[in-house]
Each structure stands twice: as C-alpha cells, then as structure tokens.
Image: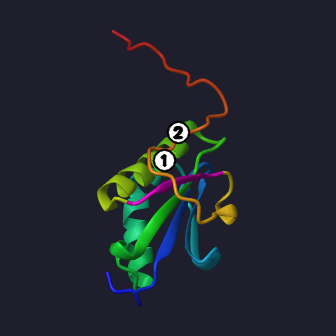
Amino acid sequence: MDKSEKLYCLAIDTATQMTKISLRQDAREIDCLSWQSRFNQSQELISQIDEFLSKNSINKTQIRSIGVGMGPGSYTGIRIGVTTANLLGFALNIPVVAIEEIDTVQDTCYFGPVLPIYQGEPHITTAKL
C-alpha cells in the first residue's frame, strides 16, 4: 500500500429500520448514507456498501477498520449488521470495532468478532408439523 494512500473507517448501523453507513477519516465523517430499509437489510446492505464506496472512489483496500452498531435494537437487524461487519473484517483482514452509536466511531482497533446486544431474548418457536 502506498503511504500517500488515504485510509478510512467504514461504520455500519442496522439496529433500526433506518440503516446507516458512514465513511470516516481521522475521526471525521467524510460521507454518510442512510435509508429506510423496511426489513430488507439482508438484501440491501452489501450492494449499498459497494455503491457507497464506489461513489466516494474508495477501494476496499483503503478501509482500515469497520465500526458496527451492536445494539440494542432489532434482533435481525443487528445480526445482519454485525455479521456483515465481521465477514468484511475477516475477508479484508482488518479490525472490527463495536460502537454504541455510529457518530461515536473512534480509531480504536480490535481484532476479533463483535458480539451483538439485543433488547431481549429471541422468541424462537418450534416448527409446526
């Protein structure tokens, strides 16, 4: 990597129906995208991240860390965001940082999976025969 190449932190928050992606450099927000996902985060998140990075002319190799909202919030929404962040972190070999709010992303480095915090125990039903 060229030393003059700029490095960024990608932040993801999927705890609510309002999904937010933020791009930060040196603790300052460069750009932000938010949209009303209406329970479609699993179908939209990866493509939205790709389009967001392309729009900002950012290559994935320029991402040095990923911040992810770990809740509390929607069980499925948090699971999608945390899983996506952990998979991107693993694939790009970069740290994933747990954040309480997307606006509080710091330059803290943590290598390892982020664990979500849910509002309550999941309600799992048995299969109907």
Residue in view at x 66 percent, y 41 percent: 72
Snapshot quadrant of residue 50: bottom left
Q: Main secondary structure of the magenta part?
A: strand
Asked if residue 25 is positioned above or below residue 73 in the image, the reply reads below
Which contiguous range is marked in magenta?
Answer: 94-99
Total count of labels: 2
Report, in whole angstroms, how far the alpha carbon at label 2 lies from the one at label 1: 7 Å
Q: Report the amino acid beneath label 2.
A: Leu
Q: Position of residue 95 (x, y in %)?
A: 45, 57
**Residue under circle 2?**
115
Q: Report the amino acid beneath label 1.
A: Val
* Nearest to the observer: residue 1 or residue 99: 1
Whether residue 98 is in magenta: the answer is yes
- Horizontal side, residue 48 vs residue 105: left or right: left
Whether residue 106 is in magenta: the answer is no
> Which dot, 2 or 1, sits closer to the camera?
2
Q: Give the structural element (helix, strand or loop) at label 1.
A: helix
